[in-house]
Amino acid sequence: MLITQTLGNLSELPDSERSAVTIDPVRLGNLELVKRVQRVTTASGREIGLRLPTELRELRDGDVLHREGDEVITVEVLPSDVLVIRPASIHEMGVIAHGLGNRHLQAQFFDADSEYGQAVMVVQYDHTVEHFLEHQAALYSREDRVLPHPFRHAEHTH
């Protein structure tokens, strides 16, 4: 089976309809979420091909890839190993962001109204970054998180 577009997201279905479908997830990690062309396998063992349009920047948790009656193939995003950095001040955030920015790390930022409950910076786990944070005496935690967007390399020039 070849999938060439998504059919919405499970979150868009009414609760009554969502509870009536049988979900066969395709479990994808961070790197696979941005690949337009790939072969994947569902949890039940069905092989499918993805050839998604260029305007689709990324797959997201709950995206519906195929629906036939009450059977739905969806995307299930696997948790990423990340460091959640909780700066104590704007000064500390500046020092940390400057130190990590020179490494061209992919980062995501969340406000206090997010599930984190405070402003945080989230980066993929790396032992050298963890060492840097320890050296800076920064407050951080290592967590497995399903992020709303995959990490992407930032475009830049020197």
Image (cartoon, rainbow, N blue to C red):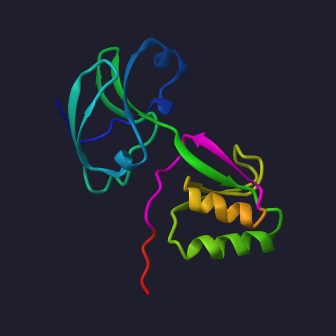
Instruction: Classify residue 121 as left or right of residue 78.
Output: right
Give the answer, above or below, for where 14 lies relative to 133: above
Seen from the viewer's position, the closer of residues 4 and 137 is 137
Camera-side residue of 28 and 137: 137
Which range of residues does the magenta coloring cover? 138-153
Q: Quadrant of the C terminus?
A: bottom left
Image quadrant for the N terminus? top left
Give the residue displayed 77% in from the left and 52% down from the top: 118
Q: Is residue 80 left or right of residue 110?
A: left
Residue 145 drawn at (x, y percent): 58, 41
Quarter location, residue 70: top left
Q: Nearer the viewer, residue 2 or 70?
A: 2
Residue 6 figure quarter: top left
Is residue 13 one of those drawn in magenta? no
Task: State the residue lying farthest toward the bottom.
Answer: 158
Position in image of residue 12 (x %, y %): 48, 32
- What residue is drawn where x is 56% and y is 52%? 125
Q: Position of residue 142 (x, y in %)?
A: 65, 46
Exactly how many numbered labels are in the figure?
0
The residue that appears at 26% across and 34% down in the rendered structure is 40
Q: Residue at x 52, y 15 (%)?
A: 16
62 sits left or right of 133 in the view: left
Furthest residue in direction right, as rendered? 88
Secondary structure, magenta segment, majority class: loop
On the rendered structure, is 116 left or right of 17?
Answer: right
